Image (cartoon, rainbow, N blue to C red):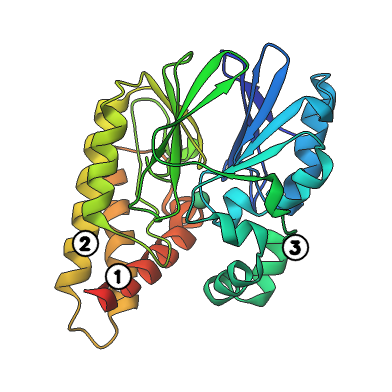
Amino acid sequence: MPDRIHYQELGNGITCIDTYLDRPGLAACYLIEHEGMAGFIDSGTSNSVPILLQVLEKKGIAKESVAYVMPTHVHLDHAGGAGELMQLFPNATLLIHPRGARHMIDPAKLEQGSLAVYGEEAFGKMFGRLTPVPAVRVQETEDEFELDFNGRKLVFLDTPGHARHHYCIYDEQSQGLFTGDTFGASYPELNKGKNRFIFPPTTPIQFDPAAWLVSLDRLMSFKPERIYVTHFGMHENLPSLLMLLRSTIESYADTAQELSDSNNREKEIEESILQSSIDYLTDQQCEVDLTTIKMLIGRDMELNAQGLEHWLTTL
Ligand SMILES: [Zn+2]
């Protein structure tokens, strides 16, 4: 639990809350309020539950007013705290992608999968523990499911690419999309001045570049004005971000395939994608020094390489 909690009102009853995963500005979740109803989009981990409760308290929102907990997908930085939140919010329903539902009801397999990716020590520190959600409180969201959020329309879209259990939510009122990891990750430190940096998290094990590009087209067909990404915050200049994200998805796939015959391919993929990010940022005259860039995205590139390595084994 950090000394200070950080949250920012973004208008339209939407609050961005820093869930403080490892460092500030890494992972967010969103509180949405409308006519006395509240909901969380993404939950952070069980470590971030006290932060979310504090924000509710500061805003004078009763736990009973939380009607929905909506993890965009079942990766733990998005859904790890959902079970515990469901215990705390007596009137809440968990809305989840049909492919993710069983993992929220019985998180054992999810825990094993994440232990394999992160290792035991980092897992405990980052994610804490997982709490199962009773099946009767879980509602699966089919593609194009429309939620009447107390008179506000939220549309749930099946958006594979980062993960097959990923939905995005279009919010008609803000003309905004809650995109989890589907519209990439873009950290505040690397978005100063005119610089924009965004990358696709290709975390193991369901990276699918072709599906991802289709999902992005689908999201853009709603003509969104803004996106709310988990890593991190609200972004409004969508055409330029989209162009960069699309080309990076393609170049990751190309890089992985070019290096597929190498004996040490995972490490080489990691070095290559990290270096191209550094080259891009240097080219953009990003004023962040190399050590800080590596601190900000080094771990992501390691996970991305793991995901690309796994993808190569499926081809
Ligand atoms: Zn994530």
Q: Where 16 falls versus 143 (above or below)?
A: above
> How much space separates mark 2 and mark 1, taking CA atoms?
9 Å
> How much space separates mark 3 and mark 1, taking CA atoms?
28 Å
Q: Nearer the viewer, residue 285 or 10?
A: 10
Toward which corner of the image does residue 101 lie, by quadrant? Answer: bottom right
Q: Disc 2 marks which residue?
A: 253
Q: Residue 129: which numbered mark, if any?
A: 3
Q: Residue 279: which numbered mark, if any?
A: none
How far from the left and from the top, in percent, is residue 182? 38, 44
For the residue marked with disc 2, what is the amino acid? Ala
Instruction: Please tell me which of labels 3 and 1 falls first in the chain.
Output: 3
Q: Is mark 2 on a helix, strand or loop?
A: helix
How far from the left and from the top, in percent, is residue 29? 61, 37
Q: Residue 311: which numbered mark, if any?
A: 1
Residue found 42% across the figure and 30% down from its top:
192
For the residue marked with disc 3, what is the amino acid? Arg
Q: Where 119 falls versus 211 (above or below)?
A: below
Instruction: Please tell me which of labels 2 and 1 falls first in the chain.
Output: 2
